[in-house]
Image (cartoon, rainbow, N blue to C red):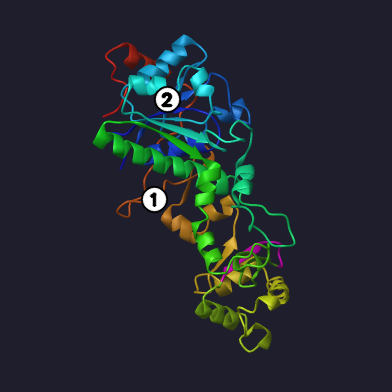
Amino acid sequence: MLSGIKIVEICGIGPGPFCAMHLADLGADVIAVERGESTSITGAANAAKNPMNRGKRSVVADLKTPEGRETVLKLIENADALIEGMRPGVMERLGLGPDVLLARNPKLVFGRMTGWGQHGPMANAAGHDNNYASLSGAMYHSGTAGEAPSAPITLLGDIAGGALYLTIGLLSGILNARSTGKGTVVDAAIVDGSAHSMGLMLTLASRGLLSEQRGKSVHDGSHFYATYRCADDHYISLGSMEPQFYALLLQKLELQDDPRFAKQWDMKRWPELRAAFAEVFASRTRSEWCALLEGTDVCFAPVLSQREAAQHPHLVERGVYFERDGMLQASPAPRFDGQRVTPGEVPSRGAHTEQVMAGLEGNGAVWRD
């Protein structure tokens, strides 16, 4: 879908590489400019084959040298966008800031991925996914009143609040540049995106359904929207909010005649009913609950590990996961015209350096048509 879109990625860690991978999955031509040494927190051995580089071409360049900087400047001359995820001011100190790059290519969309944003009191502070989601308010209602707030690792901040917002920003900027001839700088901050992602929750708050007190709202305090431990120490999730779904749940659990559950929205009784449900779900294994509830309108699902999810019949039929070179990966999303996209191979570090450099030094034919 993005054939003809040309992206230069200044490689780092976190959401920037995911954004570039997402664009490559959808057909963009992405050249990843990597350092010579490993930047992976898991070490060089694992970094040699980084699944987030799939579908990209990998070039090694030292941006602290004139040669490395010139490589980037030549690459962006015919690029639609650049992605970088360094702290504010680093690209400027390298001589590769927006002013320099936009002077070379006025149509360039300069995508900046940070946690705190390009300005503000915390702009230059270190941080990670959980810190950004904490400050934005996005993590506050994750969990119940009796436990510390937590959120799925990397998903709430890095991906949902960061990478996907940068993706939208880049594509919007590219569309604008193609119609106006003018590039732009995209300031994609995870703290901004994770706050914006709470639109549905803020709607609940406007309707009086989201309390400032943890454990007192539908999503973190009710018995019918929760996660429960099973007899085998696995977990299941419920989302039986609508009255017809709640009624079906009670029927399946043979609790339809129990007066304790008659008033679904009696919030004062939620702690008691949550404890009652916990006892019920602890009486059977996850597999037994799946046999009874999965695929019904109860709004139910087992809580699966990634490996388990890859083997679930629904995800297998849709091809949601695949394994290549010994690495489990998720297939590109979304789909177009019902077709599943096959992502590109994962290159080794610097696999395309000679090819790309030859193009820059020759007739400039670096980018794919």
* Distance between the alpha carbons at the discs numbered 1 and 2: 31 Å
Left or right of 81? Residue 349 is right
Quadrant (top left, top right, bottom left, bottom right) of the N terminus? top left
The answer to whether 340 appears left or right of 13 in the picture is: left
Mark 2: secondary structure: helix
Numbered disc total: 2
* 174 sits left or right of 10 in the view: left
**Residue range highlighted in magenta:** 231-239
Lower position in the chain sequence, tag 1 or tag 2: 2
Instruction: Answer whether residue 297 is visible to the viewer in this image.
Output: yes
Spot occupied by residue 158 in the image (x, y as percentages of width and height): 55, 42
Q: Residues within 10 Å of mark 2 (few under 14, many from 20)?
A: many
Res. 27 visible in picture: no
Residue 113: x and y, percent? 50, 35
For residue 318, which quarter of the picture? bottom left
Image quadrant where one finds the C terminus: top left
- Against 77, is 329 above or below? below
The picture quadrant where one finds residue 235 is bottom right
User: Up-down: is 90 above or below 222?
Assistant: above
Task: Identify the residue position indicated by label 1 in the image.
Answer: 334
Residue sitting nearer the eye, 339 or 270? 270
In magenta stretch: residue 237: yes
In percent of the image, x 48 and y 26: which residue is there? 348
Question: Disc 1 residue type?
Answer: Pro
CB of mark 1 within 8 Å of CB of mark 2?
Answer: no
Q: Nearer the viewer, residue 356 or 68?
A: 68
How dense is the environment of label 1, judged by Cα within 10 Å: few (below 14), some, or many (20 and up)? few
Say what amino acid the circle numbered 2 marks.
Answer: Pro
Q: Which residue is mark 2?
A: 98
